[in-house]
Amino acid sequence: MRLEWLEDILAVHDAGSLRAAADQRLLTASAFTRRIRVVEKAIGGELFDRRNKPVTLRPHVIELIPSIRELVAGLKKAQDELSGLGDNEQVTRIICQHTLSVSWAPKVAKLLTINGLQMRIKSGSKDECMLSVMKNDTDLAIVYVDPSGQNEKNSDLFDCFRFAREHFLPVASLNLASSLDQVFQVRRVPLVAYPRDIYLGEVLERVLSNGVKKGVNAAIVAESGLGPAVLEFVREGIGIGWLPLSIIKDELVAGTLIEMTDLLPQFELDVVVKKSKSSSYKRIDANWALISENFSLELV
């Protein structure tokens, strides 16, 4: 019996259906169903009553849920203690979305190191960040959250605090901005976008569908899921890209980058730190409190 299998069973119980549990586990419904079949084959019995829609756990499995939950917590704690990441460990494990690793993560790292803590940081997509915290592979996640609440999943599984609201502005290099009159004559405005299959891409697609100035024929000429890469494309004059004000404000002041908000929409995202509600470590709670006190976080 593997830890992730036990977590899958708990996910179905807590979410109420296989499909909802798949979303919670950040898997497609078909992939999650296949994994459940593997679990049942491994234990030699059925866990679910498939006569009902949605599929439900069998009564004897439901009776075992408290024991399974206790077992999962114990295994996670043993895993951390064996790897040296128990309550006595001074390393704070943080995962953040790629762009945040160069904008807000350094501010958090400075705070932790000043207080004698070591920080171990990695980056990934928003889904990867959420799964990492959910599985207790990392202590905290720093991610973007849409203030409107759209595209947000599994909010009931995490404790969340907002410590900033980030403005994403469409910007162009000085050379590209100065050539816009010629661009308009051919009705083509080149864009550097985020891929649609990542969180920033989903947000940008929705923003563009609602806010492009009438008569502007915007065409995506390049894509990247990394904010620093988008910034380099913009600097090279490849197209207009959306970047957080926190990493471009100096260049806007210097005039090397130009705001293009007269043509294209801007948008805002909250910067949020999250931890799993199932976490039982005092050190994680202590780090959470430290960040909260110093960044004047607001509960989301």
Image (cartoon, grey):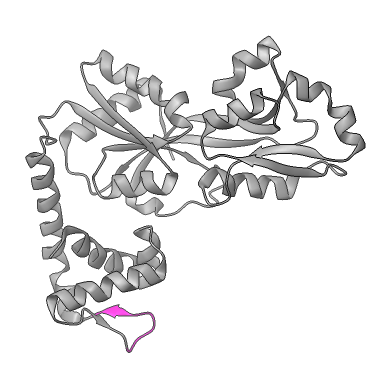
Q: Is residue 193 left or right of residue 140?
A: right
| Viewer-nearest residue: 293 or 266 | 266
| Res. 16 visible in picture | no
- The image shows residue 298 at horizontal and vertical percentages of 43, 32
| Res. 224 visible in picture | yes
User: From what the image shows, is residue 70 above or below residue 272?
Assistant: below
Name the image quarter holding residue 61: bottom left
Name the image quarter holding residue 110: top left
Quadrant (top left/top right/bottom left/bottom right) for the C terminus? top left
Quadrant (top left/top right/bottom left/bottom right) for the N terminus? bottom left
Q: What residue is shown at x 24% (from left), y 16% (from top)?
A: 115
Asked whether 185 falls inside the magenta stretch, the response is: no
User: From what the image shows, is residue 140 above or below residue 202?
Assistant: above
Per the picture, the main secondary structure of the magenta-coloured stretch is loop
- Residue projecting furthest to the bottom: 51
- The image shows residue 225 at horizontal and vertical percentages of 52, 40
Q: What residue is shown at x 64% (from left), y 40% (from top)?
A: 222
Q: What residue is shown at x 13% (from left), y 71% (from top)?
A: 64
Q: Is residue 118 left or right of residue 89?
A: right
Q: What residue is shown at x 23% (from left), y 45% (from top)?
A: 136
- Residue projecting furthest to the right: 185
| Viewer-nearest residue: 227 or 287 | 227
Name the image quarter holding residue 50: bottom left
Tell me where the magenta segment starts and ends, as one range: 51-57
Count of all numbered marks drawn on residues in the image: 0
| Viewer-nearest residue: 43 or 281 | 43
- The image shows residue 294 at horizontal and vertical percentages of 35, 20
- The image shows residue 204 at horizontal and vertical percentages of 63, 44
